[in-house]
Image (tube, rainbow, N blue to C red):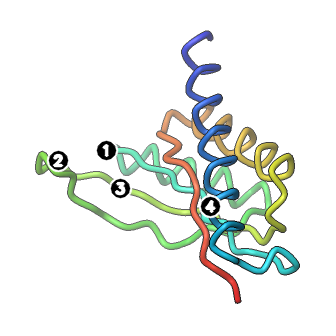
Amino acid sequence: MKMIDEELQQWFSHTEMLISELLEDGTNEEVYHTIEHHFASSDFDLLEKAAIAAFKLGLEIEEPEEAELENGDKVFAFDIATEQMLDVDLIKKETKAMFELAKKCGVDYDGWGTYFEE
């Protein structure tokens, strides 16, 4: 359990840093941002089950894709997209929920990203 806590803390730090950088760069903090949470697994069946579980929770699932890692291994990935204000506490709460969903489904949570908004 301790390792999971440390990993989640790293994602919380990532969240604080990313939001801070976006705001420093001048993103419009008055508008909703599309937040894309990244999920991955080398096992397509597991990833598909995770996508179905997320869909059943009413989340917006992006089309799964196949990617190749630097070492040549294949990995499958999909994103869950949400619309959020750049509020650290709100996105940390969402990150925790996504992280826990990934762990429950046996896939990797690979953080989140967003786009600069004018």
Exactly how many numbered labels are in the figure? 4
From the image, tell me which residue sits under label 3.
Answer: 76
Q: Mark on residue 73?
A: 2
The image shows residue 117, relative to residue 58, as above or below, that is below
At label 1, the amino acid type is Ser
At label 4, the amino acid type is Glu
Task: Find residue 6 and report its horizontal and vertical position in percent.
Answer: 59, 20
Nearest the eye: 38 or 49: 38
User: Residue visible at 58% across and 32% down?
Assistant: 10
The 10 Å Cα crowd at callout 4, few under 14, some 14 to 19, many 20 or more, is: few
Closer to the chain start, of discs 1 and 4, is 4
Q: CA distance from mark 2 to mark 3?
A: 10 Å
Q: CA distance from mark 4 to mark 2?
A: 32 Å
Left/right placement of residue 2 relative to residue 93 reads left
User: Residue visible at 49% across and 47% down?
Assistant: 110
Q: CA distance from mark 1 to mark 2?
A: 8 Å
Asked if the residue under mark 1 is in contact with the one under mark 3, i.e. CB atoms within 8 Å, the reply is yes
Q: Residue furthest top?
A: 2
Asked if the residue under mark 3 is in contact with the one under mark 2, i.e. CB atoms within 8 Å, the reply is no
User: Residue visible at 69% across and 61% down?
Assistant: 55
Closer to the chain start, of discs 4 and 2, is 4
The image shows residue 71, relative to residue 83, as above or below, that is above
Q: Mark on residue 103?
A: none
From the image, tell me which residue sits under label 1.
Answer: 42
From the image, tell me which residue sits under label 4.
Answer: 21
Mark 1 or 4: in front is 4
